[in-house]
Image (cartoon, rainbow, N blue to C red):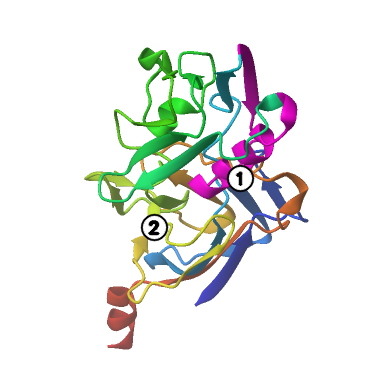
C-alpha cells in the first residue's frame, strides 16, 4: 500500500491552481505499477477550510436611500453569515453621515422558510434591489423588486424567495487517475463527497467510515496525480480569493491510499 498526501500549500514538485482548488503532484521517481495487477485509490481523510466566498464582485453592494441621499455599502469578497452582513451594515449606517442609526437596516432570518425579513428603524428608508452587483437577490429580493421600503413609519418587509447564503451544498473531491466513481448517475472521477457542516472559516474534518474504492485506470507507472475540489454542479470552487492574507497557506489537504484491489489481493493469496 502506498500513502499519498496532497494539500493546497505551494511547494516543490507540485502545481497549485490560482483558485486554490486544484493541485497537481509530480512524482520523481514515478510510482511503479504492476501491469498484471488492478489498483484502487481510496480517500482516507480530508481537511477543508470552509472559506468559499458567497459574496464576490458580482453581488457585493447594498444600495439604500435615506434622507434624500443614496448610499452604497460595498462588501469585501468573502464567506458571510447573515450576522456578518448585519455587522457591516450596522457599522456603516451608524455613522452620522450615513443615517446615524446602527439599527437603520437589520436583516433577520425566518428559519422555517429561509426567507429574510428587513426591519427599518426609521421612516422613509428604501433599498434599491435593481442596481448592478446587488447583494439583495442572494437574500431573496430579486432585482425585479426595484426599490423597496419607503413607508412613512418604521416598518418591515419579507423576501420573495428563500435566501441563498449557502449555495455550496457539497464539495466533490476529484482525482484524475480514477474513473470508477459516480456523480449525478454519471461515471466520474469523484473519490469523495463532503458536505459543509461547520461555521464559516472553520475546518471541515472528513473521515469516511467506509472509504470509496475507486479503480485506477493508469498502467505501468504514475508520473503525477491531480486533485480537484468542485461544487455539486462540477464547477471549480474559488478558494484562492476568499479571505486574503488572513487564511492559512494550507486551505485543504487529503490523505489517499493506492493499493491492489481486494479481488486482486484475494487472488494472489491463493
Vertical placement of residue 112 versus 153, above or below: below
Q: Is residue 179 left or right of residue 23?
A: left
Q: Looking at this view, is 194 or 71 the one in front?
A: 71
Q: Is residue 101 left or right of residue 173?
A: right
User: For the residue carrying disc 1, how many other residues have a C-alpha within 10 Å: few (<14), some (14-19), or many (20+)?
Assistant: few
User: For the residue carrying disc 2, how many other residues have a C-alpha within 10 Å: few (<14), some (14-19), or many (20+)?
Assistant: few
Residue extending furthest toward the front: 153
> Which residue occupies 31% across, 37% down?
162
In reply to whether residue 74 is colored magenta, the answer given is yes
Magenta region: 68-97
Provide the residue designation for mark 2: 195
Mark 1 or 2 closer to N-term? Answer: 1
Q: Looking at this view, is 49 or 44 the one in front?
A: 49
Vertical placement of residue 166 versus 30, above or below: above
Vertical placement of residue 155 versus 131, above or below: below
Locate residue 97: give its quadrant.
top right
Residue extending furthest toward the left: 185
> Which residue occupies 56% across, 34% down?
104
Q: How many marks?
A: 2
Q: Position of residue 217 (x, y in %)?
A: 40, 53
Q: Secondary structure at mark 1?
A: helix
In reply to whether residue 79 is colored magenta, the answer given is yes
Q: Position of residue 228 (x, y in %)?
A: 52, 48
Q: CA distance from mark 1 to mark 2?
A: 27 Å
Provide the residue designation for mark 1: 87
Amino acid at each position: 500500500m502506498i500513502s499519498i498526501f496532497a494539500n493546497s500549500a505551494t511547494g516543490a514538485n507540485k502545481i497549485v491552481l490560482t483558485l486554490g482548488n486544484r493541485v497537481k503532484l509530480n512524482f520523481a521517481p514515478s510510482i511503479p505499477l504492476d501491469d498484471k495487477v488492478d489498483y484502487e485509490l481510496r480517500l482516507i481523510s480530508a481537511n477543508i477550510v470552509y472559506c468559499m466566498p458567497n459574496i464576490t464582485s458580482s453581488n457585493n453592494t447594498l444600495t439604500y436611500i435615506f434622507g434624500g441621499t443614496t448610499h452604497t455599502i460595498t462588501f469585501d469578497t468573502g464567506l458571510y453569515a447573515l450576522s456578518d452582513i448585519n455587522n457591516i451594515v450596522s457599522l456603516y449606517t451608524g455613522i452620522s453621515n450615513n443615517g446615524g442609526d446602527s439599527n437603520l437596516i437589520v436583516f433577520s432570518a425566518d428559519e422555517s422558510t429561509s426567507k429574510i425579513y428587513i426591519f427599518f428603524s426609521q421612516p422613509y428608508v428604501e433599498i434599491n434591489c435593481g442596481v448592478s452587483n446587488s447583494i439583495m437577490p442572494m437574500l431573496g429580493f430579486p432585482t425585479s423588486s426595484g426599490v423597496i421600503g419607503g413607508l412613512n413609519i418604521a416598518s418591515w418587509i419579507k423576501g420573495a424567495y428563500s435566501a441563498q447564503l449557502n449555495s455550496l451544498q457539497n464539495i466533490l473531491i476529484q482525482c484524475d487517475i480514477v474513473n470508477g466513481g459516480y456523480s449525478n448517475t454519471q461515471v466520474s472521477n469523484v473519490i469523495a463527497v463532503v458536505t459543509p457542516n461547520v461555521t464559516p472559516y472553520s475546518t471541515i474534518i472528513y473521515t469516511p467510515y467506509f472509504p470509496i474504492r475507486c479503480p485506477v485506470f493508469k498502467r505501468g507507472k504514475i508520473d503525477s496525480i491531480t486533485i480537484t475540489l468542485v461544487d455539486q454542479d462540477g464547477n471549480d470552487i474559488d478558494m484562492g480569493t476568499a479571505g486574503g492574507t488572513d487564511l492559512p497557506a494550507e486551505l485543504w489537504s487529503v490523505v489517499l491510499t493506492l493499493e491492489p484491489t481486494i479481488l486482486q489481493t484475494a487472488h494472489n493469496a491463493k
